[in-house]
Amino acid sequence: MLCFGHRGAKGHAPENTIRSIIKGLELGVDWIEIDVFYIDGHLVVFHDETLERTTNGRGFLRDKTFSFLRSLDAGEGERIPTLQEVLDAIAGRAGLNIEIKGDNAASAVVNLIQDRARSGWGIDSFLVSSFNQREIARVRQLDQRVRIGVLLDGFPNCYPAIVDTVSAYSVHQNIEHIDELFIADAHALGLKVFAYTANHPQEIRRMSTLGVDGVFSDYPERVLSIRNSL
Ligand code: G3P
Ligand code: MG
C-alpha cells in the first residue's frame, strides 16, 4: 500500500508549503500530493479558492497577481510555493501527484513534466489528477504518457467514460465511498485505487484490509507504521 503525503504532511506543517513537503520526505512517503492552480501565468501550489484559511491574505486567489500571492505568509513564515520549487525540493526522492484545481493549468503542468522528464525524472514519477474532467482530458491530449488519476467523491455515472477518455492509471476516491465492490470494479477496469484522506489508524487499517493500492494521509508516519506492522 503506497503512502501519499497529503498536501506534503499537512498534519505536521502548513499544508502545500515546502516545509510540509520536506516533512513528508523526512517521514519517508512514497509520493507527495499537492494542489495546483494556474494564476497570473504561474503554477501555484494552493488548495482553496480563497486565501483566508491558510494565509494572512483575503479574497479570491484568482483575482490576485503572482507577486502579491508570493508576499503572503502561508503559515510559519512559509510562502506559497510554485510547482517548480516543489519539484526542486523533492529532487527525485518521491513521486509527485499534482492535483489540478481550477481551470487552464493542464498545459503548463504538462510542459513542466516534459521538461523534468527530459532532465532525468522518470515520467512515472508523476501522477496528474483532478476533479476537473476537462483538465485531465487536456493533459491526455497533450501527452499520451503521463499517468492520470480520476478524482471522485462518490459514484458519478460518467466515471467509466472519463476513465476511458483519459486512459486513466488510477482512481482516487474518498474513503467514505470505498468498499469491496468499488475496489473490485476499479481493479476490473485496470485502475489502481488510491484513497483519500485516511488519518485515523482505524481508517488506515480498514483501507489496508480492503486492499486499496495507496492512501493519502496528513500523517504519513501512521500509514508507514501500519504497513510495516503487517
Ligand atoms: O488528491 C486527494 C485529495 O487531496 C483530494 O481532495 O480537497 O484534499 O484536494 P482535496
Ligand atoms: Mg488535493
Image (spheres, helix red, strand yellow):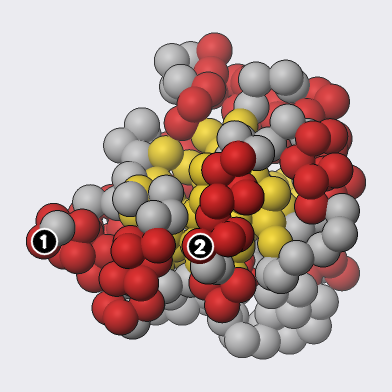
Q: Residue furthest left?
A: 229
**In front: 2, or 19?**
2
Residue 101, how many percent across, how many down? 74, 58
Residue 34, how many percent across, how many down? 54, 56
Label 1 amino acid? Answer: Ser
Residue 73, how many percent across, how many down? 53, 76
Q: Label 1, label 2: how many angstroms apart (C-alpha)? A: 22 Å
Q: Secondary structure at mark 2?
A: helix
Badge 1 vs badge 2, beta-carbon distance below 8 Å: no
Q: Is 157 placed left or right of 116 in the picture?
A: right
Q: Quadrant of residue 24?
A: bottom left
Mark 1, residues whose alpha carbon is within 10 Å: few (<14), some, or many (≥20)?
few
Residue at 40% from the left image edge and 62% from the top image edge: 210
Residue 93 in sight from this viewpoint: yes
Quadrant housing the C terminus? bottom left
For marks 1 and 2, the one nearer the N-term is 2
Q: State whether residue 90 is above or below residue 10.
A: above
Q: Which residue is mark 2?
A: 180
Residue at 49% from the left image edge and 26% from the top image edge: 124
Q: Mark on residue 229?
A: 1
Q: State whether residue 64 is above or below residue 131.
A: below
